[in-house]
Amino acid sequence: MFGEENHLTSAIKNQLVLEFPSMAENVGVARVAVAAFAAQLDFSLDEIEDIKIAVSEAVTNAVVHGYRDRPGLVRVAAMLTSDELVVEVADRGKGIADVKKAQEPTFSTDPERLGLGLSFINSLMDKMELRSTPGQGTLVRMSKKPQQTASAAGKV
Amino acid sequence: MFGEENHLTSAIKNQLVLEFPSMAENVGVARVAVAAFAAQLDFSLDEIEDIKIAVSEAVTNAVVHGYRDRPGLVRVAAMLTSDELVVEVADRGKGIADVKKAQEPTFSTDPERLGLGLSFINSLMDKMELRSTPGQGTLVRMSKKPQQTASAAGKV
Amino acid sequence: MRLELRRQGTILLARCAGDLDVASAPAFRERIDRQLHRYPQIIRLVINLEKVDFIDSSGLASLLGRYKEMQRRRGQVFLVGLRPQAYRLCQLSGLCKLVHVADSESSALARVEPRP
Amino acid sequence: MRLELRRQGTILLARCAGDLDVASAPAFRERIDRQLHRYPQIIRLVINLEKVDFIDSSGLASLLGRYKEMQRRRGQVFLVGLRPQAYRLCQLSGLCKLVHVADSESSALARVEPRP
Ligand SMILES: Nc1ncnc2c1ncn2[C@@H]1O[C@H](COP(=O)(O)OP(=O)(O)O)[C@@H](O)[C@H]1O
Ligand SMILES: Nc1ncnc2c1ncn2[C@@H]1O[C@H](COP(=O)(O)OP(=O)(O)O)[C@@H](O)[C@H]1O
């Protein structure tokens, strides 16, 4: 599931790759790093919050579902084109048998969870794509463009 | 200069690897990510500020001196043991001829700069180590332990 | 995440600060549930999220879990000081239909009727 | 980094917010220098760093550069609202010995003597 981030239509201007062991404590690190990276485009503060939630959901899924209690690495790749942020979250964990079913709101294989993570990503980002092979891993690809047209006055 | 982070005395509990192109805009992303990662240890807010400055100086050096205007990748690896943060910043840029001279306060090969980056790292972190091979790249390794003994009350 | 718990008779007040996500949710859950099990008389749980900087579906799940526990004892949950982002997720998830949402602790406490 | 520039006669007031580092220093330098070149009468530069969250040696270098430019025209630089971290770097670097450090804009402006 790694190294699949080279199918963008427009040119990549900047890229950030993060890699860390599957630990709940790293979910916050990932969302803060991607938010700081995303701020290079003209996202509003609300949009940056949306991105943080989406990244948090995808990385949480890699940790909680992908690897469960087994060790493994999570890889987050964030890319910027001139007007879009693309984020890919990949694990080499247990994978998903039915990616369509997984995306249904409130569907979860864990009774303690809400089954809303992928729905949140879908609502908060412009696009989401889920690819998975059971036993091999999962890749979530999401993208978002800033909605505001004019840049904040005085920002350099 | 990459992949040399496996010579710690105590066991690594967690690790974060960042990789990004040599661009000034990414310096802030790196320091924010390492600060969020470092917060897993009991650092005070002042110590987190120190770590941010140190990371900023090392990554700035990779961008400004290591690669100058040429493209290249910067790699930041942060590791946590039970009581220490270790950060390595590596580039495959032009390298340093005299690492001892480079560490002298106010020494700089760039007249626009202060020559204080490495001194700041030295002052703000517990330890700093500089390894470089001209034409191959540079690795700065720095470490810091939290000074406070008791953890903040109520934090879970 | 920082959590401050105060019990006043049949009310448990939980003041939360920082991030409520998959890393902090287990401690949030355990510390509140410990109080609930120790004091079966608690029938109103007031959770102040004013200082919560971040919340996601794992955080929401820990709120919903406390709601279910309070349901079991026929009690109520009040959420106080939801920031816009948290409020939106709360609505997206339907949690806002189950719990009581209040602007401030005092207005939440004022809405708490004495035990019948 | 956000930068707000105001000229009042011989004084240039620069209010800075955000991060002052290698990414923002070039714009900081250029925007201030453009004013200095346009208005040679400016002999006092007051830089308000109250809202600067982060500064490192690249940020300090951009301050020192403006100091040198003001030296050339026999002017002065005032730094206002240095946070503890910025103040410490300012001292470590020796910059605090060159510029005037003030607590507030008004105290910096009060210390600005009228042109001789
Ligand atoms: N990275 C992943 N690896 C394995 N399974 C996943 C992964 N991401 C999602 N899933 C599956 O999809 C389901 C729905 O995910 P999601 O909508 O995020 O809800 P939740 O995490 O609350 O279960 C999960 O319960 C899980 O079975
Ligand atoms: N990553 C690097 N690659 C090449 N040269 C470096 C690197 N880091 C530091 N140097 C050299 O060491 C000198 C001193 O560095 P430093 O103390 O950070 O000051 P400054 O960045 O202000 O020049 C630099 O001027 C440069 O010549």
Image (cartoon, coloured by chain):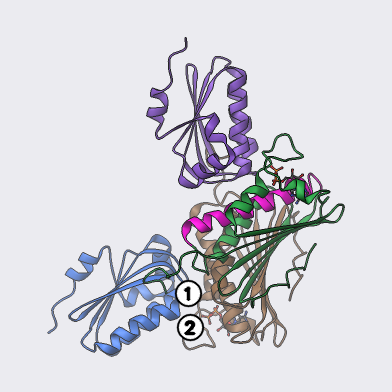
Chain colours: A brown, B green, C blue, D purple
CA neighbours of label 1 inside 10 A, class few (<14), some (14 to 19), many (20+): many
Q: Which residues are magenta?
A: B44-70
Where is mark 1, residue-wise? C57
Name the residue nearer the viewer: B37 or C89. B37
Q: Secondary structure at mark 1?
A: helix
Q: Secondary structure at mark 2?
A: loop
- Where in the figure is residue B52, as x and y percent of width and height? 58, 55
Q: Answer yes or no: disc 2 within 8 Å of ligand 1.
A: yes
Disc 2 marks which amino acid? Arg
Give how far apart the Cα atoms at labels 1 and 2 are: 8 Å
Of the 4 image quadrants, the one containing the C terminus of chain B is bottom left
- Where in the figure is residue D116, as x and y percent of width and height? 47, 9
- Where in the figure is residue C13, as x and y percent of width and height? 26, 74
Where is mark 2, residue-wise? A113
Q: Is residue B45 left or right of residue A35?
A: left
- Where in the figure is residue A114, as x and y percent of width and height? 47, 81
Chain holding disc 2:
A
Residue displayed at 63% across by 82% down: A66
Question: Is D107 located above or below residue C110 in the figure?
Answer: above
Locate residue C42: give its quadrant: bottom left
Disc 1 marks which amino acid? Ser
The kind of secondary structure the magenta stretch mainly shows is helix
Q: Is residue B154 left or right of residue B149?
A: left
